[in-house]
Amino acid sequence: MGWWLINADTLAGGRFVVSALAETIASLRLLESGTAAHPGERAWLDAHRPAYRRLLQREPVTAALLDAALGVTTKWTADFLTPPHPGVGSPAFHEELATVRRTPPERAHADLEVSLGRPLPAGLRVPDAAGRLAGLLEWVWTHTVEPDWDRRRRVIEADAVARAGQLSRGGWAAALDDMRPGMRWLGDGRLQINVHDFPPRDISGARLLFVPVTPRKGWVAWEEPDPDRYMIVYPCAGPLAGADDAGAVPEALGRLLGAARASVLVLLATPLSTTQLVALTGQGLGSVGRHLRVLLDARLIDRRRAGRSVLYYRTEAGDTLVSAQRA
């Protein structure tokens, strides 16, 4: 199994960050696999995968480069395709993509040979290998991610809030153990990051970055030869990632309660905090608070304390009302 050795200072300094590039790479992986984790992803794939497949059919060299870069056999993605987040701020997508695009040809070819697991075929030793894959990522961003980025970003931010809550209640072991498949805290400063037979790495002293994405995809990344940042990309929690479906407001319910209040009620099929609701709905804290008070008074929702957070959830009456409008 692959694991990292992490000292207390590195772990304590771990940060959650938002990456438009990571979200786009995860979406590219989803387009490649064609396997949906929930109905929202299935609808998204149905809407975008046919155009994606047609694009690759028109660009066979790019398609072959992508196959090599994703490392299906080696389980190792070409390093240049997944650069680590800078660790500060929230860079725009094209700022992050520029790192991929300016990869020198010799480095791109070397990384592709590692991910492919054998010498790169002559037909793929093209000088614009990085540029071709950057162009593909730009297409995925422009056509499939950017139109929905505001909602995706809210889901990502809500997941980071939830993880921070886990951290405050149960420490890093609670926050890390269910972050992504194959990842768990082993104790003694050891973090298992996957189940593959990769050599361990001592990352003590480096910056540790956690990057949520909405598709059910994940990976780790760092930049050689002397990494100062390590990035763990992980899928948002299921109820949040599926908020696209869970948050769909029936038209009649919106007329009855008002669209904003109805969206809060619909989302509370899963217990959520006020902060998470603000992130998911895009409404202000005051507005969400007013909606919660009205729904509490109507006994459509209830609340309970979980550590330092207060979680709101639908009552049986709230479930009945939402179900009746969806019938």
Image (cartoon, rainbow, N blue to C red):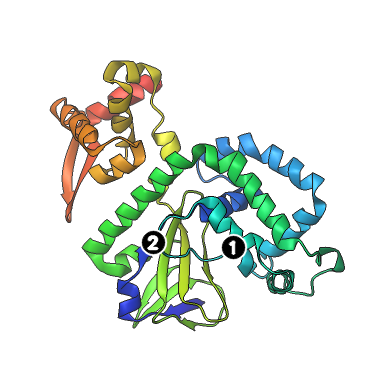
At label 1, the amino acid type is Thr
Label 2 with label 1: CB-CB less than 8 Å:
no
Mark yes or no: residue 271 visible: yes
Q: Residue 67 carries which label?
A: none
User: Taking 25 as reference, is 140 above or below it?
Assistant: above
Q: Which mark is residue 178?
A: 2
User: Taking 206 as reference, is 33 above or below it?
Assistant: above
> In the displayed structure, does residue 280 sit left or right of residue 245?
left
What SS does tag 2 mark?
loop
The answer to which image quadrant residue 292 occupies is top left
Taking the spot 61% from the left edge, 53% from the top edge, the residue there is 29
Which of pointers 2 and 1 lies earlier in the amino acid sequence?
1
> In the displayed structure, does residue 144 sit left or right of residue 254?
right
Taking the spot 34% from the left edge, 20% from the top edge, the residue there is 254
Q: Which mark is residue 99?
A: 1
Q: Measuring from the top left, give residue 44's x and y in whole percent.
A: 57, 38
User: Taking 320 as reference, is 231 above or below it?
Assistant: below
Observer-nearest residue: 85 or 304? Answer: 85
Mark yes or no: residue 26 visible: no
Looking at the image, the residue that sits furthest to the left is 297
Q: Measuring from the top left, give residue 97's x and y in whole percent.
A: 59, 56
Taking the spot 43% from the left edge, 39% from the top edge, the residue there is 151
